[in-house]
Image: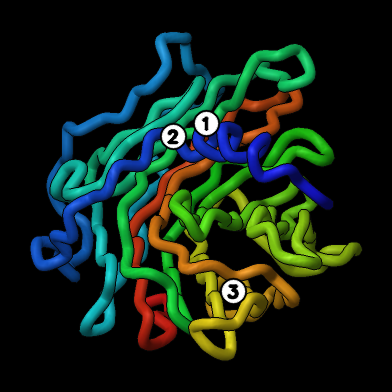
Amino acid sequence: MRFNRFVVLPLALLALGALPACSNDDDDDNDNPDSGTSADAGTEDSGTVTFPDAGTDPGTSPAGTCPAGSIVCESFSSGLNGWESSGEHATIAAENGRLHIVTENGLDERNGQGQAIARWSRSIPAFGTQLFVRAHVFMRSLPGAFGQMGTFFVVSNLGSDFGGFELQVMQDKGFALDDWSFRQGQGWNRQPEPVTRGMEAGRWVCLEWEIRRPTAASTHGNTRVYVDGTLIHDFTNIGMRAFNTFNVGYGFVHPLGPSGSETFIDNVAVSSTQRIGCQ
């Protein structure tokens, strides 16, 4: 897949939302399991957002601690806490100590109806050679259409070292990686079919994402995805940049009709020193 940088730049800005630099206030984060309720919401679209089972409590999320020196350690119990909220045809809010995202149903990009996605974003130190992400995720359902991808995480650099990629899930529970790093060999990659192991809906899942490159100057590397501690897929020959922004949320940059979803995310941790694990 090949892109023109000057065409994709405004598209990427639209997909990611406004991404001003966030203050690094990680010292205010805590490693404790969820408690309390945060009222900060990120409703970014005036349209009605509906999903059949929205509001049904998914139950208590697993406990999740963070390693010493974590770049991000977020239990969603302190409001925005240095994050920037954005979205289109979706709502996102820190509620009851977890991130709650609902996307509007019935949107189809082929009809020019835009996206159905919401995210929280924040600045991180420029990516060097390794980055580890952990989150506990509860999905009410997997994407409802073949070829429609739901995005969880994004790393990007929208400055002079422009580029990024995002971790996605497919209807068949397989994972995909949308690589818009503008490196030779970049493009859209998916977990090979048939998918025997992948993401699951209807329960809390420990989702880990690992990003590596040999040196801080390397233009390519690999990224692995784990579910409940088991390696699901290793995406290779992925373009790398000095990524300095991290996004977490859910939704569809390219909705195809059944775009309604409800997702809960908790215990988000990001580290540049070690794999975090599920606990």
Q: Position of residue 253 (x, y in %)?
A: 63, 35
Q: 178 left or right of 194?
A: left
Front residue of this view, candidates 246 and 264: 246
CA–CA distance in space, label 1 to label 2: 5 Å
- The residue beneath circle 2 is 17
In what element is the residue under mark 2? loop
Packing grade of label 2 (10 A; few <14, some 14-19, many >=20) is some
**Neighbour class for label 3 at 10 Å: few (<14), some, many (≥20)?**
many
CA–CA distance in space, label 2 to label 3: 27 Å
Q: Nearer the viewer, mark 2 or mark 3?
A: 2
The amino acid pointed to by label 3 is: Tyr
Quarter of the figure with the C terminus? bottom left
Callout 3: SS = strand
Is there CB contact under 8 Å for labels 1 and 2? yes
Task: Describe the element under mark 1 as helix, strand or loop.
Answer: helix
Report the disc number at residue 226: 3
Q: Nearer the viewer, residue 42 or 221?
A: 221
Type of the residue with mark 2: Gly
Give the crowd class for mark 1: few <14, some 14-19, many >=20 residues within 10 Å. Answer: some
Q: Position of residue 118 (x, y in %)?
A: 45, 34
Q: Position of residue 227 (x, y in %)?
A: 58, 70
**Residue placed furthest toward the left:** 28
Judging by the rendered image, the residue that carries numbered circle 1 is 14
What residue is at 60 percent from the left and 82 percent from the top?
218
Residue placed at 44% from the left, 29% from the top?
87
Which of the marked residues, 1 or 3, is nearer the chain's N terminus?
Answer: 1
Point out the frontmost of discs 1 and 3. Answer: 1
Query: Where residue 141 appears, x then y in whole percent?
Result: 62, 41
Q: Nearer the viewer, residue 108 or 31?
A: 108
Instruction: Name which residue lies at 46% across and 64% down.
Output: 243
